Image (cartoon, rainbow, N blue to C red):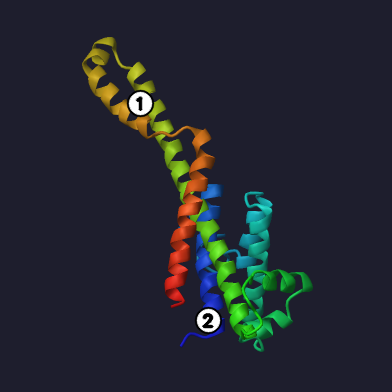
Amino acid sequence: METTRAKVIDKAVGFEELISQLLSMLLEVDKNTSISFGNKNPALSFNSKVNLLVDLKFIHRETISDFQLFAEIRNKFAHVLYVDNFTKCIELLSSSSKNKFKEIFTGDSQNTDEEVILMTCFEILCFRIDNWLRVTLKMISEKQSQNLKKVGAIEMIRGFINYENTKKIKKLNYFINTITKIIDEIQPDEEFLREYGELLKKQEVELSNELKENNK
């Protein structure tokens, strides 16, 4: 049976991988060869990666708070031997973190064991972080793909313009058919936020269903 400490550390490892992917995309570095985001000793710590996301001003206030709360909980389980459940963990949290963590639970707590309540709070906290990371990664990946298509379209047009006139005539139909397909796949930037919202809702439903299945 998985221990509470193992559960927390496992979540942290998963989040750290997603954060590394996100930072690599934002900073345009190859994660596989990166010193900071790789798997070797010089790589940045979990906390450092979260702080870097904050410094980049890429993450909104509510999500920053969620990340910082998770990092504090993760550190207690990772570095304090005494902490082997959430009841003990919350004893060592700062007052603000303790209040924020307990406020996550909105159900009836009168007849519910405290450890169960805190475990539920942790699951919801992880759900929110996982949802934000996955949706944001998907949107950035698609945005990068769109930018590559735009660059590709421009290069195709530039190449066509540089053709000799006789070659342009021969290649005209092929060029038009090819470039049209590429342009049709390019989405205008103003749609980014709308698509982000739709993906966020879709991802939230999928993760919520997954969470319910896991808790059965």
Can residue 134 be seen here? The reply is yes
Q: Nearer the viewer, mark 2 or mark 1?
A: 2
Q: Nearer the viewer, residue 166 or 41?
A: 166
The answer to whether residue 158 is above or below residue 136 is: above
Categorize mark 1 by other alpha carbons within 10 Å: few (<14), some (14-19), many (20+).
Answer: some
Q: Quadrant of residue 42?
A: bottom right
The answer to whether residue 172 is above or below residue 5 is: above
Amino acid type at mark 1: Met
- Give residue 49's position: percent from left, percent from top: 61, 61
Q: Check the image and name the residue furthest to the top.
A: 165
Which residue position holds label 1?
A: 156
Q: Gap in Å between the C-alphas at discs 2 and 1?
A: 52 Å
Left or right of 207? Residue 174 is: left
Left or right of 164? Residue 77 is: right
Residue found at x 37% / y 22%: 157
- Give residue 209's position: percent from left, percent from top: 44, 65
Which residue position holds label 2?
A: 6
The answer to whether residue 150 is above or below residue 119 is: above
Residue found at x 29% / y 22%: 176
- Give residue 155's position: percent from left, percent from top: 39, 27
- Give residue 78's position: percent from left, percent from top: 61, 79
Amino acid type at mark 2: Ala
Q: Are marks 2 and 1 in contact (CB under 8 Å)?
A: no
Element carrying mark 1? helix
Q: Check the image and name the residue furthest to the left.
A: 170
Residue found at x 43% / y 60%: 206
Element carrying mark 2? helix
